[in-house]
Image: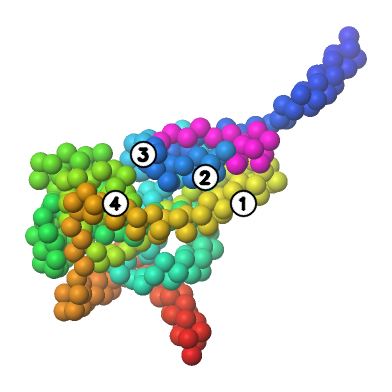
Amino acid sequence: MRARTTIALVLAAIALAAVGVPASTERLILGMVLPRNTMWHKVITEMTDDWRRGTEGRVTVLVRDSAGEERTIVQRMRNDVFQAGALSAIGLTDIDRGFDVFGIPMFFDSHAELYHVVRALTPRFEERLEQRGFVLLGWGHVGWVQVFSTRPVRTVDDLKSVRLFTSNGDDEMVEWYKRHGFRPQALSVADVPMALQTKMLEAVPTTPLAALSFQWYGTARHMLRIGIAPLVGATVVTRKAWDRIGADDRTTLLAAARRMQDRLEIEVPRQDEQAVVAMQKRGLEVIAPEGAAAAEWRRAAEEFAESMRGSRVEPALFDEAVRARATFRESRRGSRS
């Protein structure tokens, strides 16, 4: 009887292999707060399809878009309700405050400079995420933050006079704004449209592509074009889920995530510019400070950046970013000489 049972099990295994059923599978639930029919949603969906095809079905993904606030997604990942997340800096800083280093006002002069610093700091963030139970699969550029407002904002004092959006759940950021003379309004992203319409909110720092995708520009019809900071994102997975995936399949997942990263680095800047043009055709006013006004914004940004060192960003990480930026700028000067 035992021999017949063993033979039956062997034959069953052979039959399963013959029809191509994976020996073991891992089903991931990936959360993100991104509207459908946006570039980010499309790229994330294509990446997860690549994971399924590349692993021959051993890794499948259920994408939960508009899955609440990003901090809720992070909490669900910690509780193993979700195993992965496509997060912006809002969610990433809930895992590790060090991600604030990429949001220092006017710290970066170009996308190329940003990408250089991100790559230089990647090993550091891989290590920091590992310590917190997460794995960095790839970066996802979200765009460059500008200020969209319901009334024109031209100067630093103008910005301090309006009710300014900041994401809820970060009391320290609210206090940081207040210490520097701003009027922060901590809200969820879902509350932004109604808050703009009721004047509870008068200005939203966001990227042009996001303002177009979420249709916020319909109420916030003025854009201050000063390039506050890039909005950096990343795809992460829990260490617990990662450890259940075979080594070869991990390589496949990483490769697909890096392809997504490379694509977003090219596509997002281009589509950000296209979004500005599209919104201008529908009535958006673009305000670009020049001369003394531009210099005022630069001075304010430098003061804000210095205040973030040690408060929002730990000094060692801040200084590492400064060194990486200096290396990039020196290489550019050398190439022009």
Badge 4: how crowded within 10 Å, few (<14), some, or many (20+)? some
- Residue 302 relative to residue 99: left or right: left
Distance from the alpha carbon under mark 2 to that under mark 1: 14 Å
Q: Is residue 18 visible?
A: yes
Q: State left or right for residue 49 relative to residue 2.
A: left
Q: Which residues are magenta?
A: 50-65
Answer with left or right where residue 140 lies relative to residue 71: right
Three-letter code for the amino acid on which mark 4 is drawn: Ala
Please provide percent x and percent y for residue 247: 69, 46
Question: Which sits earlier in the primary sequence, circle 2 or circle 1?
Answer: 2
**Which comes sooner in the sequence, label 4 or label 2?**
2
Q: Which mark is residue 35?
A: 3
Element under label 3? loop
Q: Is residue 58 magenta?
A: yes
Q: Residue at x 11, y 55 (%)?
A: 151
- Asked whether 130 falls inside the magenta stretch, the response is no
